[in-house]
Image (spheres, rainbow, N blue to C red):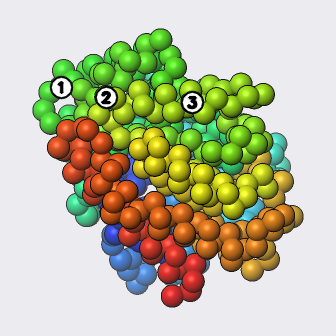
């Protein structure tokens, strides 16, 4: 049996987006039973041969890639391949996805994927394979469904990703040590997909897998600073592993407030952490209160203390770690002034900004709130965080997109890029410069796409 596992592309800057291994490709290969011939295709880096139809085409679907994913699925089904779709988008929109697939996967795949392959071999494959508490909320049929009620128990270990099957070379490898997020930000689907309980892989397993990888990598956890005891042990072990490492990941500002925060930050920096993506989300107090991110920022709902936020940022930076901030703009509580204040905040704190427009993703709390306000001309490829998707009470569609571009262009002048490199090591400065130039190019590509060029 031949299997193609496919990671689709979408319009944008594939060169920048393709710098890191998409972990889903080699990991899904790792949980595929032996005896199946597996090919990995990352369409950000590789072309796909539609004349070479496999027995099974498995496609990982994110919302801005959904249109492209469905096109790929339809073409392979025409060639006689069985097509399965999985990922965040199919978990939120399984009935839609079922129109383009022989089987749809909802949630994590450790149990459901091998089960599907077994069912297919025995001629009794189901239409839907569900992991986790999804069944009652997605409008699925009562029959033709396989349900694994529990989420995967990562404490029992997980197989190492099949990096030997990757065709291209990447600047950054990727690995995951935990899943789950205790925060329920209204615009994020992570908690819905992975649950609000953080599940850990054994530290020994993670370190052993790191020994098989290169020197540069991305830790794809939802928060590289959660559960400080686990983090201290993991980063201490990476330090003991020795050898040159440079890695980055996503974390929260909670590390700046915890009593053991300095201890963990020190070990993280020693282990090679050079940059952390942080969801600062907004400089608008009303927006922060509205979106439910105050707990993540360790703030009181009644009174947002921005000086405390700045202090946490400064603490992370004091260990030579670059802070890259996500800022979501375009909430009803935002005005034109919010865009200017975002730039001023980053100038003051030295945060490398990634500003984007609000995307009401299917499967999030905002989807139900905003779906009645969406512009009808939208297709899924516009769910890319640089298109304005819905009617704002005070800012027009084109005006909103122009404000985002103006902010991005102003934030990535060469003078500001150099100022944000900070006092870290030469390696961190070089990495920070490279990362910012990649963002600058990506934002320019985004603007050309918004303008239809």
Camera-side residue: 164 or 52?
164
**Are discs 1 and 3 less than 8 Å apart at CB?**
no
Camera-side residue: 268 or 60?
268
Check disc 2 and report its element: helix, strand or loop.
loop
Can I make out residue 90 in this image? no
Q: Residue furthest bottom?
A: 453
Check disc 3 and report its element: helix, strand or loop.
helix
Quarter holding the N terminus is bottom left
Q: Residues within 10 Å of mark 3 (few under 14, many from 20)?
A: few
Q: Which residue has dot 1 on it?
A: 241
Can I make out residue 345 in this image? yes
Residue 149 % position (x, y): 68, 34
| Comes first in the chain, label 3 or label 2 | 3
Q: Which residue has dot 3 on it?
A: 307
Q: Is residue 249 above or below residue 199?
A: below
Camera-side residue: 342 or 80?
342
Residue 34 % position (x, y): 35, 47
Per the rendering, the mark at residue 319 is 2
Name the residue located 20 percent from the left edge and 38 percent from the top edge. 425
* Label 2 vs label 1, nearer the camera: 2
| Comes first in the chain, label 1 or label 3 | 1
Check disc 1 and report its element: helix, strand or loop.
helix
419 relative to 382 in the view: left or right: left
Name the residue located 73 percent from the left edge and 54 percent from the top edge. 334
């Amino acid at each position: 049996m031949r299997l193609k596992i496919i990671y689709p592309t979408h319009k944008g800057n594939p060169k920048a987006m393709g710098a890191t291994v998409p972990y889903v490709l080699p990991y899904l290969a790792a949980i595929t039973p032996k005896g199946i011939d597996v090919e990995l295709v990352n369409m950000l880096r590789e072309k796909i041969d539609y004349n070479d139809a496999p027995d099974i085409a498995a496609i990982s679907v994110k919302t801005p890639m959904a249109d492209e994913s469905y096109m790929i699925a339809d073409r392979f089904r025409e060639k006689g391949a069985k097509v399965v779709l999985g990922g965040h988008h199919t978990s939120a929109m399984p009935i839609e996805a079922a129109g383009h697939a022989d089987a749809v996967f909802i949630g994590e795949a450790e149990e459901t994927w091998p089960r599907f392959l077994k069912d297919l071999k025995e001629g009794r494959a189901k239409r839907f394979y569900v992991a986790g508490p999804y069944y009652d909320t997605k409008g699925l049929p009562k029959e033709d469904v396989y349900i694994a009620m529990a989420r995967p128990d990562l404490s029992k270990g997980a197989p190492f990703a099949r990096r030997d099957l990757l065709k291209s070379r990447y600047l950054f490898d990727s690995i995951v040590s935990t899943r789950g997020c205790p925060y329920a930000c209204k615009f994020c689907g992570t908690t819905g997909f992975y649950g609000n309980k953080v599940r850990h892989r054994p530290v020994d397993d993670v370190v052993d897998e790191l020994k098989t990888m290169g020197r540069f990598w991305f830790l794809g956890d939802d928060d590289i600073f959660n559960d400080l005891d686990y983090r201290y042990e993991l980063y201490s072990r990476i330090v003991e592993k020795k050898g040159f490492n440079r890695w980055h990941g996503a974390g929260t500002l909670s590390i700046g407030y915890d009593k053991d925060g300095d201890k963990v930050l020190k070990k993280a920096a020693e282990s090679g952490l050079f940059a952390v993506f942080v969801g600062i989300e907004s400089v608008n107090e009303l927006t922060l209160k509205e979106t439910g991110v105050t707990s993540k920022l360790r703030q009181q709902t009644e009174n947002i203390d921005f000086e405390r936020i700045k202090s946490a940022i400064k603490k992370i930076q004091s260990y030579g770690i670059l802070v890259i901030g996500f800022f979501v703009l375009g909430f009803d509580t935002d005005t034109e002034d919010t865009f200017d204040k975002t730039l001023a905040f980053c100038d003051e704190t030295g945060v490398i900004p990634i500003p984007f427009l609000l995307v009401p993703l299917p499967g999030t709390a905002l989807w139900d709130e905003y779906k009645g306000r969406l512009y009808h001309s939208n297709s899924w490829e516009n769910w890319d965080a640089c298109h304005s998707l819905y009617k704002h009470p005070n800012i027009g569609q084109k005006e909103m997109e122009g404000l985002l571009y103006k902010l991005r262009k102003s934030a990535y002048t060469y003078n500001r890029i150099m100022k944000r490199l900070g006092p870290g090591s030469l390696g961190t400065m070089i990495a920070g410069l490279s990362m910012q130039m990649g963002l600058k190019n990506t934002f320019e590509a985004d603007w050309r796409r918004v303008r239809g060029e």
